[in-house]
Amino acid sequence: MTAEKTRALLIVEDDLALQKQIKWSLDRFESVTANDRESALVQLRRHLPAVVTMDLGLPPDADSVSEGFKLLEQILAVDADTKVIVLTGQNDRVNALRAVALGAYDFFAKPFEPELLNLTVERAFRLAELQAENRRLQEMHQPDALAGLMTRDPGMLRVCRTIEKVASSNATIMLLGESGTGKEVLARGLHQASPRKAGKFVAINCAAIPENLLESELFGYERGAFTGASKMTLGKFETANGGTLMLDEIGDLPFSLQAKLLRFLQERTIERLGGRQEIPVDVRIVCATHQDLKALSKEGRFREDLYYRLAEIVINIPPLRERVGDPALLAHAFVRRFAQEQNRGSMTLNEEAVRAIETHTWPGNIRELENCIKRATIMADGNQISREEVGLNPPEPDQMDGALDLRSIRDNAEKRAIIAVLGRVNGNMVKAAELLGISRPTLYDLMHRLGLK
């Protein structure tokens, strides 16, 4: 099959004789056809063609251009980069120009010259390919604020995209997730992607500091505020001025300090311990917890008004057991890191160990996985880590998911299989293709179609 044949072209034409003529003229490309708006949209979603040729006069009213313009708008709504070449009547220059104004790539008057149409379609494909390559290169060279986070799971990738979207705002963010899911990594990524990245990122764990010390840690104190206060000391709020303050385990913030935090969120000023002066502070608050703050509010242990101040944007972080492919992906990364730290040379996980890691539920999430791999790296006898050295039970037989839509079943199965295999082989595309029983180009095409990087 030639390179051109791998490029999908959609031909929308209700005149079957003309449809065949166009398809014959453009036989260098892998053409799919449609004769009305509805069938064109079906083919569009099924094949995702980079280039479309279409007639403006389509059923049910072929003498009108309304269906054609509706289809043009819908094609560009699905993918604004689709190159649409409009075929019009000989004296229909007005509608041709209108189509170009709406976003069509070019127009041709019927009857057309096959050589010129071939050349225009080829140019459209080349432009589409150049734009796609340009986007790929931009993504590769764009600094990633979430570079410290490793994932291939679609749910976790959605969390990352949400972080990137809200980073430019000044909204207070609440990160909800089990202990060890990477809340601080996401908070740091949020800071790095925000206009505040030149300022400091300051984190404090509200559960790790005794109540009588937490207030002075947060708000600072004046000289002589209490015994031992020999000099004025800035708190975390002032230290993070111009940057981001992360309040980890906010559910454990003492009730007496919740009122002071609420006042800061309303007034954006603080008072140091032992002081009387109101000090304006420009800081973004990111809080994190594994607790149900709404339930704590009903029990009277967390202020409801504070909850709604903190929960301007809530982001739920999935646990490691729900992230497809991530346990193996992270395990490989931890093995490389700890082998280097322990001067153990090149170490790998054997296949049985990887399968056990993939099927374990990881109640302690990434922190548990990290500790497990660190211990195994230290205790392993050779350069290959076994399941016994990882300390996990053999995996149980896989269970099938119940799904109904055949296309969704196939796409989801392919996506899960690719993600799982890439995690197992540590991103090696040659090994992944071998395990999946397909060629490397086919694997790349599948990853592109399924939106996997």
Image: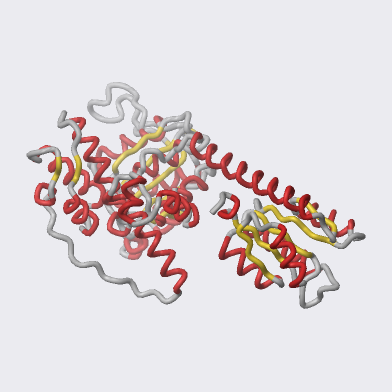
Q: Position of residue 158 (x, y in %)?
A: 45, 54
> For residue 97, which quarter of the picture?
bottom right
Left or right of 198, for residue 175: left
The residue that appears at 21% across and 40% down in the rendered structure is 335
Answer yes or no: is residue 311 visible.
no
Query: Would you say residue 275 is visible in this rendering?
Result: yes
- Residue 19: image location, x then y, percent: 73, 67
* Lateral position of residue 415 relative to residue 397, left or right: right
6 relative to 282, above or below:
below
> Which quadrant of the structure image shows residue 314?
bottom left
Q: Residue at x 60, y 59 (%)?
A: 30
Relative depth, front residue between 260 and 84: 84
Instruction: Give the residue at the far right of this rendering.
Output: 91
How many numbered discs sit on the rendered protein? 0
Residue 310 lies, with reference to residue 411, above or below; the image says: above
Q: Position of residue 371 (x, y in %)?
A: 18, 44
Of 344 and 445, the residue lying toward us: 445
Q: Position of residue 67 (x, y in %)?
A: 77, 70
- Along the line of sight, the residue nearer the viewer: 222 or 363: 363
Q: Looking at the image, what colour scheme do you see?
A: secondary structure
